[in-house]
Image: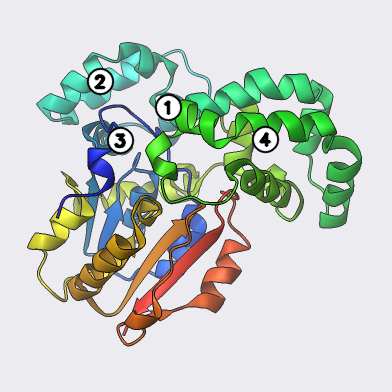
């Protein structure tokens, strides 16, 4: 059962050099325990490593892209080899002058094909390999080239100051939200420009609503209801690196837990659909499915959901995001899968990766 998107989009590049989904709400949704077997979309590896930090029996990471798995493999080598401050510098979360030295220390732990991939990308290593994905370049273009035309450096710095919700709403309305902000934001995050510079046009096949209007509405939420001073995703967009806030996998308090439990992790260059063909029933306890259903037709989504339930154990949980294409358990599967709507909505209200329209949590009956 070939993945639908695999025949339409290019998976040879690093599309995401870091995960743009909030691991804090993911872990709260999945409630991982030591006996659990987890299946995770690899992406760049951050959220898969967040699952590892909880010490489950096994974490199986899947991705269609060898480039994405090379990102995960290099992260694993870095956690095994470097200290926390070195890891942040190597990835690009902090300034560094020695990234080539960090890579030389990590390189012996990589497979031959991953060594070849990163040996050929020395410029990416020097830049900080967590900054070189297509999506990161797109967001950095907005933060460093577009935003300075819209807001002064003083105003951009003021946005990141701690404030109460009423103060943030007032700042947004009176200082930030100009007509020029709205106009250029909608242009830059339009379906056409985002599809070509940030994601892929095929990722919007099943999207019927306005991409730019949705993202502008969610950005207002991220700047007002949520606290920008504590938001690593927003800070990266504004600064081009992590400022005072870090995502879960990069925080010092989680570093040792990830390093300690790395032996539970394995990864495969394989689609979820193909993996499920060989996976025995009653095997998986927890699923991190990223936003893979965004790229599937509704009928294909239901077919894959049924196979995930078959491979899962009773009480197992699925967590995934909707950005623009609505995907929730169909009513016909109510006897197999229970929607945990209250939990999902509460967590979505806290989602620091604020651009998603919904966070979905479902439990196998």
Quadrant in which the N terminus appears: bottom left
Image coordinates of residue 64 in percent, x first then y, are 23, 42
Quadrant in which the C terminus appears: bottom left
Q: CA distance from mark 1 to mark 4?
A: 20 Å
Residue contact at pointers 4 and 2, CB within 8 angstroms: no
Q: CA distance from mark 3 to mark 2?
A: 22 Å
Pointer 4 or 3: first along the chain = 3
The vertical placement of 142 against 162, above or below, is above
Badge nearest the viewer, 1 or 2: 1
- What crowding class fits label 3: few (fewer than 14 Cα within 10 Å), some (14-19), or many (20 or more)? few
Question: Which residue corresponds to mark 1?
Answer: 134
Q: In the drawing, what numbered circle is on residue 9?
A: 3
Q: In the drawing, what numbered circle is on residue 118?
A: 2
SS label for mark 1: helix
At x 47%, y 33%, the residue is 195
Pointer 4 or 2: first along the chain = 2
Pointer 3 or 1: first along the chain = 3
Badge nearest the viewer, 3 or 2: 3
Q: Looking at the image, which is closer to me, 71 or 341?
A: 341
Q: CA distance from mark 4 to mark 2?
A: 36 Å
Q: Is residue 68 left or right of residue 93?
A: left
Image coordinates of residue 265 in percent, x first then y, are 22, 51
Colour scheme of the rendered structure: rainbow
Pointer 1 or 4: first along the chain = 1
At x 40%, y 68%, the residue is 30
Pointer 3 or 2: first along the chain = 3
SS label for mark 2: helix
Image coordinates of residue 183 in percent, x first then y, are 74, 31
At x 43%, y 17%, the residue is 127
Pointer 1 or 2: first along the chain = 2
Question: Which residue corresponds to mark 4?
Answer: 186
Q: Can residue 281 be seen in the rendering of this structure? A: yes
């Amino acid at each position: 059962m070939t993945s639908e998107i695999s025949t339409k989009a290019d998976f040879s590049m690093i599309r995401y050099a870091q995960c743009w989904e909030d691991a804090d709400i993911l872990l709260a949704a999945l409630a991982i325990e030591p006996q659990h077997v987890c299946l995770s979309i690899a992406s760049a590896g951050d959220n898969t490593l967040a699952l590892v930090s909880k010490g489950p029996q096994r974490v199986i990471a899947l991705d269609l892209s060898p480039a994405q798995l090379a990102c995960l493999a290099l992260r694993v080598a870095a956690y095994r080899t470097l200290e926390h401050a070195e890891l942040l510098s190597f990835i690009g979360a902090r300034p560094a002058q020695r990234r080539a030295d960090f890579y030389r220390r990590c390189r012996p732990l990589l497979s031959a094909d991953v060594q070849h991939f990163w040996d050929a990308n020395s410029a990416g290593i020097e830049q900080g390999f967590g900054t070189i994905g297509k999506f990161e370049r797109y967001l950095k273009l907005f933060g460093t080239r577009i935003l300075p035309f819209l807001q002064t450096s003083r105003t951009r710095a003021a946005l990141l100051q701690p404030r109460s919700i009423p103060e943030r709403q007032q700042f947004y309305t009176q200082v930030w939200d100009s007509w020029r902000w709205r106009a250029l934001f909608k242009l830059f995050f339009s379906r056409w420009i985002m599809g070509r510079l940030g994601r892929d046009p095929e990722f919007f096949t099943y999207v019927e609503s306005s991409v730019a209007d949705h993202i502008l509405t969610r950005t207002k939420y991220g700047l007002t209801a949520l606290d920008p001073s504590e938001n690593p995703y927003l800070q990266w967009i504004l600064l081009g690196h992590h400022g005072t806030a870090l995502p879960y996998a990069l925080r010092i308090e989680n570093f040792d837990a990830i390093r300690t439990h790395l032996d539970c992790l394995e990864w495969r260059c394989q689609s979820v659909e193909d993996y499920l063909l060989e996976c025995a029933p009653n095997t998986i306890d927890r699923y991190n499915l990223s936003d893979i259903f965004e790229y599937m037709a509704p009928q294909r989504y239901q077919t894959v959901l049924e196979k995930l339930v078959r491979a899962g154990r009773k009480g197992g949980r699925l967590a995934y995001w909707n950005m623009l294409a609505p995907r929730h358990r169909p009513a016909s599967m109510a006897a197999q899968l229970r929607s945990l709507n209250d939990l999902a909505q509460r967590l979505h209200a806290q989602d620091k990766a604020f651009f998603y329209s919904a966070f979905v949590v479902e439990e196998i009956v």
